[in-house]
Amino acid sequence: MLAADKLQLQSALKQQATALKEKEFNLHHSNLMTVGTQAAVLAGLDITMFIEFNPPAEDSWEEDYRSLGHVLRMVYYGVIVGAFCANMMVVAHTTALSVLGAGLALRGPDGSMMTATDGLYQERNSVFRVFGAGLALTVGSVLVSVWLLLRWEAALVCWIVTLITCRTMYTNYRRVAARFDYDESETVDFRDIMEGPAAIRGVPMYGKPSRRKVLQAAALLQRQLPVQSNYYCRKTTATDEINASYDASETGDDYDDHDDDIDADWNHHAGTEETIGGRN
């Protein structure tokens, strides 16, 4: 009875701890989706500015300024293509994080919610940096385009207005970031609950092999190696050759245990001929 009550209490605590981590996952997921949506809007604007923009021909420029017009045209198209590529990178990145992160959190093994949440939190910095670069390049293309389309008086006024807008955007960001800034070391951490009473641990990340893959590799190795009736290791003093065979009914974990025993006995009886780990 007490054992059943203990299991029920641990299960309820694990469920509540996972629900707390899910709130943090939803926060990061919502933030990334917001950035991805804005990046898609900017990507549409960039491709429109690339296709629909029709600067005047170089022949319309005065003879002394034709080389300047050629340089401005080259800079404009380079900047606008860079802005489009940066915003598309954000869209692709946030889409992958949304699909793969949510799949791991909901369908993964025990502890996947922790791994997915921490993964989204670590990836957000790269997403924000690329999005900022795409936004800056989009505004920068406007700074160049005014000199291609307008006379120098109107272009100067529009250029100054655009610079003021850029400065205002930057100062607003600095002010808002300072207002909502906090110390990362003082954030709420659920690891004491997850790794303590709830007994929840994160799953391996970055392509580390799972236990299922390790067992599959061991089974494949077992089918490929020759089959003998016993498991023993013998060293001959003349040629220092090692003859080893094993029972094919043993699992990969048994092989590892026998290897450890063989290494220990081998070091203890170096240079002698004996049979170790014999199993019938």
Image (spheres, helix red, strand yellow):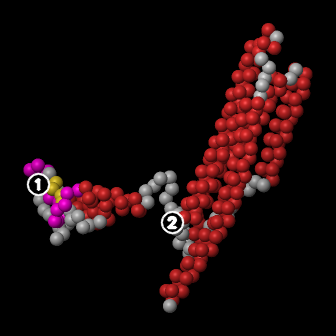
Q: Nearer the viewer, residue 280 or 171?
A: 280
Residue ID for mark 2: 109
Q: Is residue 232 visible?
A: no
On whether residue 237 falls in the magenta region, the answer is: yes
Magenta residues (range) = 225-240
Quarter of image, res 74: top right
Q: Tell me, for residue 236, which label it has, or none.
A: 1
Which residue is located at x 70 percent, y 57 percent?
30
Earlier in the chain: of badge 2 and badge 1, it is 2
Which residue is located at x 72 percent, y 52 percent?
34
The spot of residue 129 in percent (x, y) is 68, 43
The spot of residue 127 in percent (x, y) is 66, 46
What element does badge 2 sit on? loop
Q: Is residue 205 visible?
A: yes
Tell whether 234 sits left or right of 91: left
Which residue is located at x 27 percent, y 63 percent?
255
What element does badge 1 sit on? loop
Quarter of image, res 75: top right
The spot of residue 82 in percent (x, y) is 67, 33
